[in-house]
Image (cartoon, coloured by chain):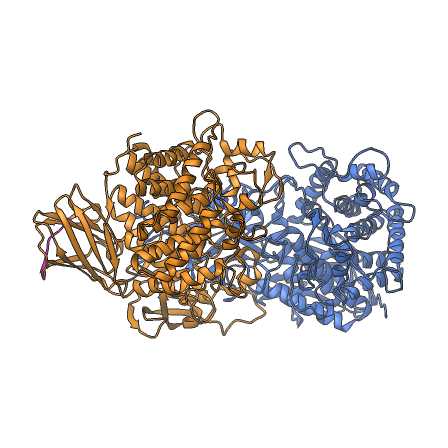
Chain colours: A blue, B orange
Amino acid sequence: MTTSSTRGQRNAEKVHIEDAFWNPLMELVRKTVIPYQWEALNDLIPDAEPSYAIRNFRVAAGLEEGEFGGMIFQDSDVAKWLEAAGYSLANHPDPELERTADGVIELIAQAQHENGYLNTYFTIREPGKQWTNLHEAHELYCAGHMMEAAVAYYEATGKRKLLDVMCKFADYIGTVFGTEPGKLRGYDGHQEIELALVKLYQATGEDRFLKLAQFFIDQRGTEPNFLVEECKRREGYSHWAQKKVPIPSVEQLSYNQAHKPVREQDAAVGHAVRAVYMYTAMADLARLTGDRELLEACRRLWSNTTTKQMYITGGIGSTHHGEAFSFDYDLPNDTVYAETCASIGLIFFARRMLLLEPRSEYADVMERALYNNVIGSMSQDGKHYFYVNPLEVWPKASEHNPGRRHVKPVRQKWFGCSCCPPNVARLLSSLNSYIYTASAEENKIYAHLFIGSEAQFGLAAGQVALKQQSRLPWEGYARFEFTEAPSEPFALALRIPSWSLNQAVMRINGVTAHYDVEQGYAVVNRQWVPGDIVEWEPALEARLIAAHPEIRVNAGKAAFERGPLVYCLEETDNGRPLASLSIERSAELRSGYDADLLGGAVTIEAQGRADEHDSWDAAAPYRPLIQQQASEPVTLKAVPYYLWGNRETGEMTVWIRTCS
Amino acid sequence: MTTSSTRGQRNAEKVHIEDAFWNPLMELVRKTVIPYQWEALNDLIPDAEPSYAIRNFRVAAGLEEGEFGGMIFQDSDVAKWLEAAGYSLANHPDPELERTADGVIELIAQAQHENGYLNTYFTIREPGKQWTNLHEAHELYCAGHMMEAAVAYYEATGKRKLLDVMCKFADYIGTVFGTEPGKLRGYDGHQEIELALVKLYQATGEDRFLKLAQFFIDQRGTEPNFLVEECKRREGYSHWAQKKVPIPSVEQLSYNQAHKPVREQDAAVGHAVRAVYMYTAMADLARLTGDRELLEACRRLWSNTTTKQMYITGGIGSTHHGEAFSFDYDLPNDTVYAETCASIGLIFFARRMLLLEPRSEYADVMERALYNNVIGSMSQDGKHYFYVNPLEVWPKASEHNPGRRHVKPVRQKWFGCSCCPPNVARLLSSLNSYIYTASAEENKIYAHLFIGSEAQFGLAAGQVALKQQSRLPWEGYARFEFTEAPSEPFALALRIPSWSLNQAVMRINGVTAHYDVEQGYAVVNRQWVPGDIVEWEPALEARLIAAHPEIRVNAGKAAFERGPLVYCLEETDNGRPLASLSIERSAELRSGYDADLLGGAVTIEAQGRADEHDSWDAAAPYRPLIQQQASEPVTLKAVPYYLWGNRETGEMTVWIRTCS
């Protein structure tokens, strides 16, 4: 294996966000979400399902008597919280939070076994059963999340305690898994450790962690299938069923993306979060090892995921059965899954693809998922979350049709399986790492997201400091100022957002500038000097969007988009049933900023039509169609999707019927 | 309790069907379905799931060693087969079939316990556990079906053997259930015995059977809730879960329509088949006892079921979770249930409402369910069946989206739970009893369905013989000839079908005749003489139908109807995706008889439009809407819904987008 950590893109060295749109969300995470989640992990939230997560560590550490509580992967919630806390501390020192985090890390260290093993479920509930149910038990998954937390906390604070704990655990895992005789040629049912080991490698420079990641990726889906064989060794005993179940077929392991070797996989299948976490690690490995076959697999899986199985909101996963992908173009709006965590994983994948090869399509999807599915999952108060992010809601159906019970019309306090809220927290706390990448060798800085920030880059040409100001998502305007620049030329590459339809004007120091277009980026390579100002104006207009004709559910419909934001109609603005509304294809869309709407947002109004109801006899479910559609003009009002469900509970739809 | 068996309507005395449309279907039942089902009951069909039904009786009768096989209610399949055989023998003597049936009846008699008890599951698998799980075990349900078989067989052949067996069982049941001290104040989780006891009463004239039916109806849903208390006595043990489960709440018993007393029920809830079987018995009792409160409940439940929870095909039950109703106007076309048995039950209910009070709306719904959902469930070869009858099918989704796996794009051979095929057989074999009712006192004959037949009626005025010829469903023409008429006047009431939009011409002996309209019937009261001919021409035209705006899924769509038939588009005629097609609201609909289509049928063609696909980049799931819809003219071809799925497997839809 050739490791080459200097290949391709790297992150900016240091990015600090200062942005009118994002700072309030990040502050919400820092001031409310992280403290609230801390209370949740400690079972201090009245009326919410208890987490047991911290208590499990206390019990495993021998500090408290008790049973294991919560999901078998409950440890990962603590890890995700710690990871978010680490990012938050990197952005914003907070001695109290740091003290709390140090205390948790102390507790985690106490729960670690002498040999490095760490997992409260197996410590408390099933000692001796370690590594006997990789298929279901999330053992390496929990390890992976704790590794991510260790790296984030180390990078934020310089404190090595958790990093050492997790390196020790990783080394122990390396004694258990591998191709050598006597080791398990296995991998986790839920991918996560693969990407985490890459992070551990990057934080420590220790090749063995990268090699272990590659082992897990290489092993997955090979014959004889480890998960099938393992299940046979357990005689089919299932943790989830709490009884013996039929041995799964290799085909059924598509749920775990273990039905065939990863390099042979073409289509996104199975549990969506597992899939994108795996793709993320694959892209990492493709970049760090130069593995061409892995790169091709990443490209194929990216393409399938984002062009055939992605909602317009950046949601993925069309069915709640297995929280899974279904198949190409099957994107039901009402029985949708589109789990928050899956979109976050898609953002991880996108970022790794950008590091691998800067193409604007990766950033386009990253932005789409971020501005819509992900931030829409959190309430304005930071204390309520959607796990499922529907594109069409009829509250009565959520209540009375069991096939839609997973679709909640209102954000929930906390979940028994509470993977999503801490995942949102860690993503938003680390948002600064998604804005830029840079290639030191090529002397090129890429701006993927337009988020106000200060960033520093170490290029071969020298050190660069760049200040971005952005009016997104409300206006198509960003301003970049170089506050430090080397005496050698270097390139600035600004993403031409897909929503601008390639209409994007660049001005340098007030003068319209020509730029080259490379893989969707506007590139200017020149000698920059401190004080140089680049203004960037991608056309940002409200538009009606159509879906590919193979997406059957959206035939004859359109969605409102404005820049990176997808919009929706809510009952509170438009009455009900929303299905009675339609929009003229040529309707003029009027955008206006409404300062009173949930912290301020641009809304879109347009002329539409409402089918008339008055002539209907309540006793006639069906009647002859009236040749001239009887409808009356109405003004439709669309609000950003990410804000839906923050006012009165009611119907919501992203897709609206069009009329001529 | 006042019993008054002469109230209201009665069936015609004898009706023999002779009809170009229905005879082939009835012959299919007689020559193929009944023999095929006999083989199925005897596990003689290769590759089909075994039934075990006959073997269970042999084991219970002590003729064979073995375990119980199949569903806990497997006995009912034998009963339904026998019932169908009975009807078939009434229409068409068949010594071999009769010998077979006699043999089964002999077997059943041998499986009966000394005290009258009869149920192979409890005899073989759980002796001693009788009447301990009314909630789940279908014990009285199976009894009910066998009572229906007994009555049908007795009426067809005059043989009392099975009737005696079931009267004995009914009497035994009467010793177990009742309000007297020491008896169970219970009822079955799956209604059926209630309507069966009414039939037993009608066949025998024994009031005690009617009273037992009324006991079950009266008891249902009263406090303390029997099913809840029974579940407590079992400490929550569930047959289906094979373990203890939480004691259900009274609210959860809405699944069994036992959440409140039946007279207080307003909306169709829970398992659809159970619901309509219960409503059928309620309507019987309302008629036979003059119970006004029960009548009002029937009217409310009829109205809710048929105006707010019925598909255009006459299907009911919107969700496969519990094979149940969901709530008003929730009629998804793709995740639909619309079980065949439920529509059959709806037909039972409609017929009982017609006996109670002749209103054409009951017959309209009866016809709708019969011509669409019910006969569409059976393949042209009589050997394959739909259990679920969808209004929209995307075969890939049935395969790859677990939420649609219950929707089969192809009729299945037989089912582990094979309630539907024998139910179709017994309905079609007894179709003659659905055509007419008559009121002897009022000297009035009602024709509800237009099916060629010869019928006799005993009116107060005297004996009437009536010959109907019909060109339905292809043409709006029926011809009635009196071949026997008394010397007193009497009335003929012909249903004015809802699909005729009240445009129906009557000619008597070639001369256009005036008629009175009473509750949707064209009534002529006069002195008829043998040879009088009434021609009846309800306007039968292909039309586009719209759905009530509250039925959100059908907003902006239309369905083709022509007379009693609902039509659909199939991929084999129209390409795919069908969602790309739309029809102009003012499109001319061209009907034509296609003799080559699956035995001959009228198809409908119309000008439509197909969204263009060619300009779509496969890599773009979403793009800006083109203001002028790019579409090309196409000829849409619709075929009767009941014929769908008999050619190449592909997409199907009943509802089509409209365009201006």
Can residue A608 be seen in this snapshot? no
* Image location (x, y in percent) of residue A103: 84, 38
Check the image and report above or below for A409 versus A587: above
Q: Quarter of the image holding residue B288?
A: top left
Q: How many marks?
A: 0
Residue ID at (88%, 58%): A174
Which residue, as the protein is rendered here, is positioned at the far top?
Answer: B181
In the image, is B652 to the left or to the right of B544?
Answer: right
In the image, is B312 to the left or to the right of A594?
Answer: left
Quadrant where the N terminus of chain B sits is top left
Check the image and report above or below for B489 versus B39: above
Quadrant where the C terminus of chain B sits is bottom left
* Image location (x, y in percent) of residue A384: 63, 41
Can residue B411 be seen in this snapshot? yes
Residue ID at (38%, 43%): B164
Within the magenta stretch, is there residue A380?
Answer: no
Residue ID at (71%, 33%): A44
Q: Nearer the viewer, residue B43 or A650?
A: B43
In the image, is A181 to the left or to the right of A254?
Answer: right
Q: Which residues are magenta?
A: B511-516
* Image location (x, y in percent) of residue A155: 84, 51
* Image location (x, y in percent) of residue A432: 73, 53
Q: Nearer the viewer, residue B285 or B578?
A: B285
Q: Nearer the viewer, residue A333 or B128?
A: B128
Q: Quarter of the image holding residue B451?
A: bottom left
In the image, is B99 to the left or to the right of A654?
Answer: left
